[in-house]
Structures are given as structure tokens and as C-alpha cells.
Amino acid sequence: MSTRGLYVFEHDSELGNAHAHELFDRLVVQRKADADGPARDFGAYSVTFDGRSLALGERIEAAPGVTLHRRC
């Protein structure tokens, strides 16, 4: 088993700046439309946040006071 993606939400406040379920609902893993037959590797899936892919190491503002960071 190996890690294929690590997405970290960093909050400015210890108590959090947004609800976790609201943030995770916006992070979507789905099978790519061009993948035929059974999925054989992680490349058959796409991971997006609000419809946008994140590059390795990229950070975006997910909500006021919350940063989403893709670590791997």
C-alpha cells in the first residue's frame, strides 16, 4: 500500500475556521471519463477541489482562514 495523495487543511485558529464536513465535501475523487474497463491504477481517478486540480506542493485558500495544501 502506498499514499497517492495527501491534502491538508490548515486553519488559522486552533478551533478551526470552517467545518470539516463542508471542506471535505468540496474535495472530490472520481473516475476519469476516458478510463475504460476496471480501474487498474490511481491514474484512472482525478482529485479536485471545487473542480480544480492541485499540483504537488500547491496551496490555495479553501475558506477564510483556511489553506488547502497538497503534500503528495
Image (cartoon, rainbow, N blue to C red):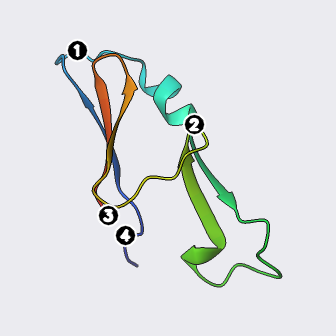
Q: Identify the element where label 1 is drawn.
A: loop
Q: CA distance from mark 2 to mark 1?
A: 24 Å
Q: Please tell me in which quadrant of the rendered image residue 68 appears.
A: top left
Which residue lies at the image location 51% right of the left edge and 52% below the top edge? 53
Residue kind at label 3, given as amino acid type = Cys
- The residue carrying mark 2 is 50
Whether tag 4 and tag 2 are in contact, CB under 8 A, the answer is no
Q: Earlier in the sequence, mark 2 or mark 1?
A: 1
Residue 56 position in % (x across, y down) = 33, 61
Q: Nearer the viewer, mark 3 or mark 1?
A: 3
Q: Nearer the viewer, mark 4 or mark 2?
A: 2
Between 22 and 54, the residue placed more toward the observer is 54
Q: Is residue 13 above or below residue 39?
A: above
Q: CA distance from mark 3 to mark 4?
A: 8 Å
- The residue carrying mark 4 is 3
Q: CA distance from mark 4 to mark 2?
A: 22 Å
Residue kind at label 4, given as amino acid type = Thr
Whether tag 2 and tag 3 are in contact, CB under 8 A, the answer is no
Q: CA distance from mark 4 to mark 1?
A: 28 Å
Q: Earlier in the sequence, mark 2 or mark 3?
A: 2
Q: Is residue 13 above or below residue 11?
A: above
Between 49 and 16, the residue placed more toward the observer is 49
Q: Nearer the viewer, mark 2 or mark 1?
A: 2
- The residue carrying mark 3 is 72
- The residue carrying mark 1 is 15
Whether tag 3 and tag 4 are in contact, CB under 8 A, the answer is yes
Q: Identify the element where label 4 is drawn.
A: loop
